[in-house]
Image (spheres, rainbow, N blue to C red):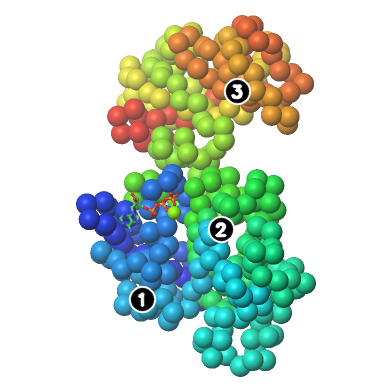
């Protein structure tokens, strides 16, 4: 059983608070992804778990053991970095064997582990090559192999795919997922790429400015972001944010803005009563807005009218930039039913999927 527990962990560099009093439990065998914009404290958090960075405050436990004062080599963790850090003068075999040699494993044991890992990572044919003779993806596999042979209790990955081209990144992403299913080890994985986070994680931890904004299963966070930051960060293209006012018309709650008048489904926002007459931010994802091909809406769909200003065909779908009143909205449309430029037309919004946020606290309203 190797869970990782962070209790009130803080790291300051001079006046910079890189990590600000975070509490985080990573259950045994889980694949947890720390995601957030550049500088939010992901690497620093990981380095504190690894023992490469001293804590300014708080406690780190690996399993049952408080490891604050345990040196990195005695923590039974393995870290895979963005730049792989392979030894250029050693061949693949040596690169993978090195850590075990330093730990005085027998030659037979080392050989068995290196060959097992190489087979799992499909680099068995490359053991005699030097890093310079490998592709980016192969180097990445060697770096993972070097971590795997140690059979660590916890794997730490810091943006391991960011040096690879887009296609290879997608393939390696799938391989890392398969690998985790096979080796069943606790993983903490850092990325600033929200797609990578969504696809890999059992649980994602969204960070900003050294604090945890939200954690949860990827789809749960996607569907129920707790605040504007998470809502805007998770999901591509980003959620639309529209300034609206909540009003009550004959007992029904409606969201109004210039050129917009949307009925709220009854009971969807239990506390909406308190917000009558006030400004709110309406969050709606591009895929929840559809061109209105019929006059009859589905249940709880409301329409907006917009001027089509920009079309971005992506192949599988087309992004349509609309202007509705004084606000800009992006909708994701079926390329076979894409509206024409500079036309004014109606779009349905699925009101059961929208989010509402308090502009002052930036928190979601339930
Ligand atoms: N050794 C250091 N000395 C001073 N400041 C540091 C040091 N390491 C990190 N920082 C600062 O701490 C903050 C968090 O940095 P960190 O590297 O953890 O961010 P990150 O989330 O990993 O970002 P990225 O996605 O760019 O890798 C940043 O403001 C950074 O400038
Ligand atoms: Mg980093």
Residue assigned mark 2? 160
Q: Can residue 356 be seen from the camera position used here?
A: yes
- Which residue sits at x=73%, y=31%? 316
Mark 2 residue element:
loop
CA separation in Å, label 3 and label 2: 33 Å
Mark 3 residue element:
strand
Q: Which of marks 2 and 1 is in front?
A: 2
- 113 above or below 178? below
- Tell me the number on the disc at residue 67: 1
Percent of width and height locating residue 131: 64, 67
CA separation in Å, label 2 and label 1: 25 Å
User: Which residue is at the far left?
Assistant: 15
Residue assigned mark 3? 331
Answer left or right for 202 relative to 207: right
- 246 above or below 316? above
Answer left or right for 280 relative to 135: left
Which callout, 2 or 1, points at the residue further toward the start of the chain?
Answer: 1
Mark 1 CB within 8 Å of ligand 1: no
- Tell me the number on the disc at residue 270: none
Which callout, 1 or 3, points at the residue further toward the start of the chain?
Answer: 1
How crowded is the residue under tag 1: few (<14 C-alpha within 10 Å), some, or many (20+)? Answer: some
- Which residue sits at x=43%, y=29%? 356
């Amino acid at each position: 059983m190797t869970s990782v527990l962070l209790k009130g962990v803080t790291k300051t560099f001079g006046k910079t608070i890189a990590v600000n009093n975070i509490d985080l439990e990573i259950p045994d065998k889980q694949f947890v992804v720390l995601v957030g914009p550049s500088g939010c404290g992901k690497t620093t958090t990981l380095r504190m778990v690894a023992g490469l960075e001293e804590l300014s405050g708080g406690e780190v436990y690996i399993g049952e053991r408080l490891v604050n004062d345990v040196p990195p080599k005695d923590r039974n963790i393995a870290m895979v970095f963005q730049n792989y850090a392979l030894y250029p003068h050693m061949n693949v075999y040596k690169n993978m064997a090195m850590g075990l040699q330093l730990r005085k494993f027998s030659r037979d044991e080392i050989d068995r582990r290196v060959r097992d890992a190489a087979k799992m990572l499909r680099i068995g044919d490359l053991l005699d090559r030097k890093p310079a003779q490998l592709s980016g993806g192969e180097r990445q596999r060697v770096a993972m192999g070097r971590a795997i042979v140690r059979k660590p209790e916890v794997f730490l990955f810091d943006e391991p795919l960011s040096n690879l081209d887009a296609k290879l990144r997608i393939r390696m992403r799938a391989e890392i997922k398969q690998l985790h299913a096979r080796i069943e080890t606790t993983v903490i994985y850092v990325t600033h790429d929200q797609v990578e986070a969504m696809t890999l994680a059992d649980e994602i931890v969204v960070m900003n400015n050294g604090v945890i904004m939200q954690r949860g299963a990827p789809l749960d966070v996607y569907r129920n972001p707790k605040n504007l930051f998470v809502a805007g960060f998770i999901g591509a293209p980003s959620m639309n944010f529209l300034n609206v006012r909540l009003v009550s018309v004959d007992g029904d709650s409606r969201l109004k803005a210039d050129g917009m008048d949307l009925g709220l489904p009854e009971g969807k926002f239990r506390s909406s009563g308190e917000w009558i007459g006030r400004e709110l931010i309406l969050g709606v994802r591009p895929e929840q807005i559809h061109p209105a091909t019929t006059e009859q809406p589905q249940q709880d769909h409301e329409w907006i009218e917009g001027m089509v200003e920009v079309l971005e065909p992506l192949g599988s779908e087309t992004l349509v930039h609309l202007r509705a009143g004084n606000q800009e909205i992006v909708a994701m449309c079926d390329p076979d039913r894409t509206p024409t430029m500079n036309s004014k037309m109606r779009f349905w919004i699925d009101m059961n999927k929208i989010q509402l946020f308090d502009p002052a606290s930036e928190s979601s309203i339930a």
